[in-house]
Amino acid sequence: MNKATRKAVIAGNWKMNKTPAEATALINDIKATIADKKTDGCDIIVGVPFVDLAAAVEAVKDSAIKVAAQNVHWAEKGAFTGEISAEMLKAVGVEYVIIGHSERRQYFGETNETVNQRVKAALAAGLKVILCVGELKDERLLGITEEIVAMQTKVALNEISAEDMKNIIIAYEPVWAIGTGLTATPAQAEEVCAAIRKVIAALYDCTLAEATTIQYGGSMNAGNAAELLSMKNIDGGLIGGASLKAPDFATIIEAAQA
Ligand code: PGA
């Protein structure tokens, strides 16, 4: 299997933006913008805040768009004030969950180990996972990007079976490129995505590595998406800022059709 047989996945990460009513409006906008365009060459996901999930699930009903949550707790239930379980996400009709985003790691104490626990809980509940990895600017400057990303990937996938890997997308997001307007060059992004694929091959096998979807994220936008998505090992995008504008998100979806 190679890029030609891996379906692209374009996912929006709305972060802490939009009320439920605004989420419905943006999804309707996205649907209207892509209505007359070819979109079956990629899967489309919107990652919305917890309180928007029910409205988003309702709004995507007559479309190909899927809904993702932006985090999940690993416990089934219990005394974890403010947290949300995988079963709860399933119950509102969510299909995907973003896990290990660098903002969770930076601001909310997420570690590789808790990422692994969350991935396990999500998969056990039947959710699909977008697993985020990526190096800090200092780590890139030290020349340890591939080691950092390999370690994040290995720990996050600890005790995850080959069967479960079918439900995991990996998003390579260099932290220095997120929300900064500083995009990794296509060559930089390709190099790390290829390295992640090698890590998957070593953990499982080459066939599974070739079948795994690896996205790039970090200031991907309507202007740079086509070039990034043309790279051999970049199978899609996790898009923050540009996913909040329907025309820009639609342009990125179009760029993924090739
Ligand atoms: P950005 O965010 O596109 O705004 O850089 C990407 C992300 O955080 O997933």
Image (cartoon, rainbow, N blue to C red):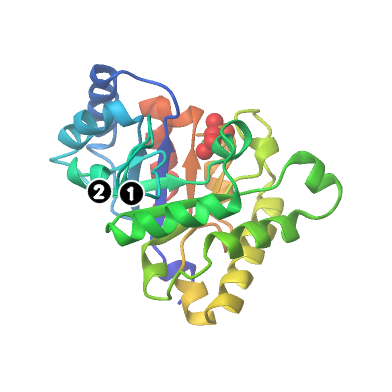
> Is the CB of mark 2 within 8 Å of ligand 1?
no
Quarter that holds the N terminus: bottom left
Which sits earlier in the primary sequence, circle 1 or circle 2? 2
Whole-percent x, y for residue 118 in the image? 44, 52
Number of marks in the rendered image: 2
Q: Could you tell whether 192 is left or right of 166 in the image?
A: right
Residue drawn at point x = 46 percent, y = 55 percent: 117
Q: Quadrant of residue 26?
A: top left
Mark closer to the observer (1, 2) = 2
Q: Nearer the viewer, residue 215 or 76?
A: 76
- Mark 2: secondary structure: helix
Front residue of 86/253: it is 86
Report helix, strand or loop for mark 1: strand
The circle on residue 87 is 2
226 relative to 121, above or below? above
Q: Which residue bears the numbered disc 1?
A: 96
| Residue closer to the observer: 13 or 116 | 116
Q: Is residue 26 left or right of residue 111?
A: left
Q: Which quarter of the figure is the C terminus placed in?
A: bottom left
The extreme left residue here reads 62
Three-letter amino acid code of the residue under disc 1: Tyr
Residue in the image at 28% along x and 36% along y = 34
